[in-house]
């Protein structure tokens, strides 16, 4: 956290946005004015020479630079005062955090699978951590996925929906850890929520039934709403894209807002001391109480957002498999 040793105004919005954005290094701590950071691999392809550069931020060639106007992304000088965005395959902080989440999920579920493999189903019941995981899995599977998708199709989509739920939940919980290797707001990155929304969009539309597509292009509405102007088919087709868009924005906005509020209350502590001892003591007490409240609330929100994303995806998948019409 930046200090205000030179009397300059503390720019809280800038500090919050800096911590929420992705970066090419992982800042761990600051000790005696020195920043301890973990450099991450930078992999970019030059637009002028076509050559690939692999290294770190400290050894970045002169033609590349970090553009603060584009959230610190790497740009390249291509001549005549012009700049261009090179092909960037760098391993950023968000990517590393996703790898950590994947490793955690693999270890958790492999350990649970090992217990079930060695247990006698007739005499042994899961306890402790395995029992908690079974409770979560069965709750999401039986109480959410099965009734939302439908009896005929829920088994096909249960693996995907369970994966999405535990991935989002783990990302949200690890993001609340204030120290390394946590603290990265993965689901507050719109690129991640976009990818999750596209996956749900594929599951909804690529595996939808014939009745689903029939209801889109020829819905059950009065004929004047379909011909000569296909008003309702256009609205239904528009809904194909608004559903995943809603999934993307809902998760991104809620998680980014929660982290922004927590960081803002943290900055209030430094702001208070810059205003004097009296303000510092008062604002510190206020910030500590609000930080505790917001962190506890974010733990609940972490579960709710994972649950809501999974629930809406399951509902949309279920709507893509309507029961075929039967003639009386």
Image (cartoon, rainbow, N blue to C red):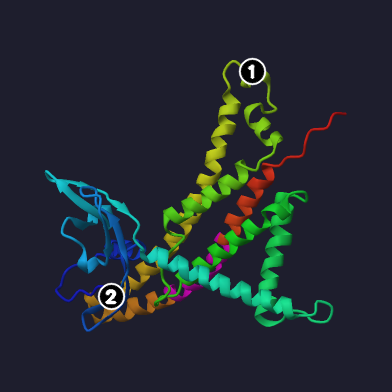
Q: Which quadrant of the figure has residue 240?
A: top right
**Whole-percent x, y for residue 170 in the image:** 53, 68
| Crowding near the residue tagged with mark 2, few <14, some 14–19, many ≥20 C-alpha atoms within 10 Å | some
Image quadrant in which the C terminus is located: top right
Q: Residue at x 22, y 84 (%)?
A: 32
Left or right for 305, reference 284 = right
| Crowding near the residue tagged with mark 1, few <14, some 14–19, many ≥20 C-alpha atoms within 10 Å | few
In reply to whether residue 301 is colored magenta, the answer given is yes
Left or right for 263, reference 230 = left
Give 87 or 146, whichever is nearer the viewer: 87
The residue at the far right in this view is 328
Q: Are marks 1 and 2 in contact (CB under 8 Å)?
A: no
Q: Which quadrant of the figure has residue 211?
A: top right
Q: Residue at x 20, y 74 (%)?
A: 4
Left or right for 62, reference 2 = left
Residue designated by label 2 = 270
Q: Is residue 150 above or below residue 37?
A: above
Label 1 or label 2, whichever lies nearer to me, is 1
Gap in angstroms between the C-alphas marked 1 and 2: 64 Å
Give 253 or 58, whichever is nearer the viewer: 58
Q: What's drawn in magenta, residue-wise? A: 290-305
Residue 153: numbered disc:
none
**Whole-percent x, y for residue 316 in the image:** 63, 46
Residue designated by label 1 = 224
* Circle nearer the N terminus (1, 2): 1
Q: Residue at x 63, y 77 (%)?
A: 111
Give 80 or 166, whichever is nearer the viewer: 80
Q: Is residue 30 above or below residue 253?
A: below
- Chief secondary structure of the magenta span? helix
**Whole-percent x, y for residue 238 in the image:** 54, 34
């Amino acid at each position: 956290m930046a200090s205000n040793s030179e009397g300059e105004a503390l720019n809280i919005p800038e500090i919050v946005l800096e911590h929420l954005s992705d970066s090419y290094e992982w800042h761990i701590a600051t000790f005696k004015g020195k920043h301890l950071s973990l450099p991450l691999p930078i992999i970019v392809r030059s637009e002028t020479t076509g050559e690939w550069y692999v290294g770190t931020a400290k050894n970045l060639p002169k033609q590349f630079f970090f553009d603060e106007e584009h959230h610190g992304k790497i740009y390249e000088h291509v001549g005549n005062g012009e700049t261009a965005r090179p092909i960037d395959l760098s391993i950023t902080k968000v990517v590393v955090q996703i790898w950590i989440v994947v490793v955690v999920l693999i270890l958790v579920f492999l350990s649970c699978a090992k217990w079930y493999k060695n247990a006698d189903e007739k005499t042994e019941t899961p306890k402790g951590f395995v029992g908690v995981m079974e409770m979560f899995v069965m709750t999401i599977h039986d109480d959410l996925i099965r009734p939302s998708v439908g009896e005929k199709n829920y088994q096909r989509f249960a693996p995907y929906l369970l994966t999405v739920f535990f991935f989002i939940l783990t990302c949200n919980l690890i993001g609340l850890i204030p120290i390394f290797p946590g603290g990265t707001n993965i689901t507050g990155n719109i690129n991640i929520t976009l990818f999750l929304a596209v996956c749900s969009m594929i599951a909804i539309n690529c595996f939808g039934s014939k009745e689903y597509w029939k209801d889109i292009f020829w819905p059950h509405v009065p004929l004047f709403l379909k011909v000569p102007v296909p008003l309702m088919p256009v609205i239904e087709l528009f809904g194909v894209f608004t559903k995943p868009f809603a999934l993307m924005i809902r998760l991104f906005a809620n998680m980014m807002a929660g982290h922004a509020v927590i960081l803002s209350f943290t900055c209030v502590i430094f702001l208070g001391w810059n205003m004097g001892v009296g303000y510092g003591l008062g604002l510190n007490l206020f910030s500590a109480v609000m930080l505790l409240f917001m962190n506890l609330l974010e733990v609940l929100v972490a579960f709710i957002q994972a649950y809501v994303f999974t629930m809406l995806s399951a509902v949309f998948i279920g709507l893509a498999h309507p029961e075929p019409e039967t003639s009386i």
